[in-house]
Image (spheres, helix red, strand yellow):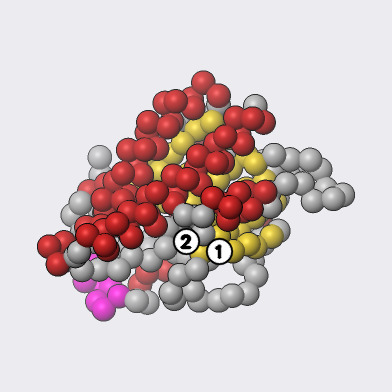
Amino acid sequence: MNEFSGASVAIAGANVGVGPAVVKAFAAQGARVVAGRLNVAGDPSHAELDGATRTVALDLLDRVSVAAFLDACAPIPGEPASSLSTLILVPPPVTTQAALDIGADVYRQTIDAELIGPILCIQEAARRMQAARKGGRIVSFVSMSGKTGVHRRVAPYAAAKGGLIAFSRVLAAELAPTSITVNVIATALFDVQVAAMHDPAEAIKGIPVGRPGRAEEAARAALYLASADAGYVTGETLNLSGGRFMD
């Protein structure tokens, strides 16, 4: 039997970035996957995500929408009872502009979408996990820009994701006694980004392993952090950068 068989896994941003691969990976391990679809420009498809038990529209800044998303993790008639065990958050695409050219309104919008929204979702999920008294896993994907600050023209996004990393560390310490772990996966260049790049070959030159990451590799990292094997791992930020960024 797969470790996640029958477990309820909520994936916010299932339709963006590495999200579809994460959905597929958890479904392959037997999880009941609720896929939260964000309304973002460039959504490649409105079809059902491969492996998702349910797909729902999700607005992370709307508490009612977040509650409905997590409510969708409730047991389906005829299936084994299961409470929310894992929340995965995948960020939408980022827009680029020089830091000094960006107005306060854009900074506020980005902070809302990329920090406040995820925090509201994490809060609601953590409360449900605490009430169930079965522990849980919370994993947020961010770009390496939120950790390193070396990427230009993404200042609002980097500020938001840096904030999410800090929030996750504090929350990890607070929730540790309840067996709820909180971790972050920081990604560099991945295959899902290459098609939109002007010069991917130049970017790949800076990666020691000589290639972009594969979405499936990001999904496997999420599987590990959501597994029982990672019960002693919390408050961490895992680098997935092919050696480009090392702590």
The answer to whether 3 is drawn above or below residue 198 in the figure is: above
Q: Percent x, y for residue 221?
A: 48, 47
The answer to whether 211 is drawn above or below residue 242 in the figure is: below
Could you say which quadrant of the image residue 33 lies in?
Answer: bottom right
Dot 2 or dot 1, earlier in sequence: 2
Could you say which quadrant of the image residue 168 lies in?
Answer: top left
Whether residue 63 is visible to the viewer of this picture, yes or no, is yes
Judging depth in this view, the residue of 62 and 43 nearest the camera is 62
Find the residue positioned furthest to the right: 78
Specify the amino acid type for callout 2: Val
- Which numbered tag is attached to residue 21? none
Which of label 2 and label 1 is nearer to you? Answer: 1
For the residue carrying disc 1, how many other residues have a C-alpha within 10 Å: few (<14), some (14-19), or many (20+)?
many
For the residue carrying disc 2, how many other residues have a C-alpha within 10 Å: few (<14), some (14-19), or many (20+)?
many
- Assign a secondary structure to mark 2: loop
Specify the amino acid type for callout 1: Arg
Instruction: Identify the residue at horizontal 67%, vertical 48% (top origin).
Output: 71
The answer to whether 121 is drawn above or below residue 229 in the figure is: below
Start-end of magenta stretch: 197-207
Find the residue positioned furthest to the left: 100
> Which quarter of the rendering shows the N terminus?
top right
Which residue is disc 1 drawn over? 37
Q: Percent x, y for residue 74?
A: 72, 46
Instruction: Identify the residue at horizontal 43%, vertical 74% (top origin).
Output: 41
- Please indicate whether residue 21 sits to the left or right of residue 192 in the image: right
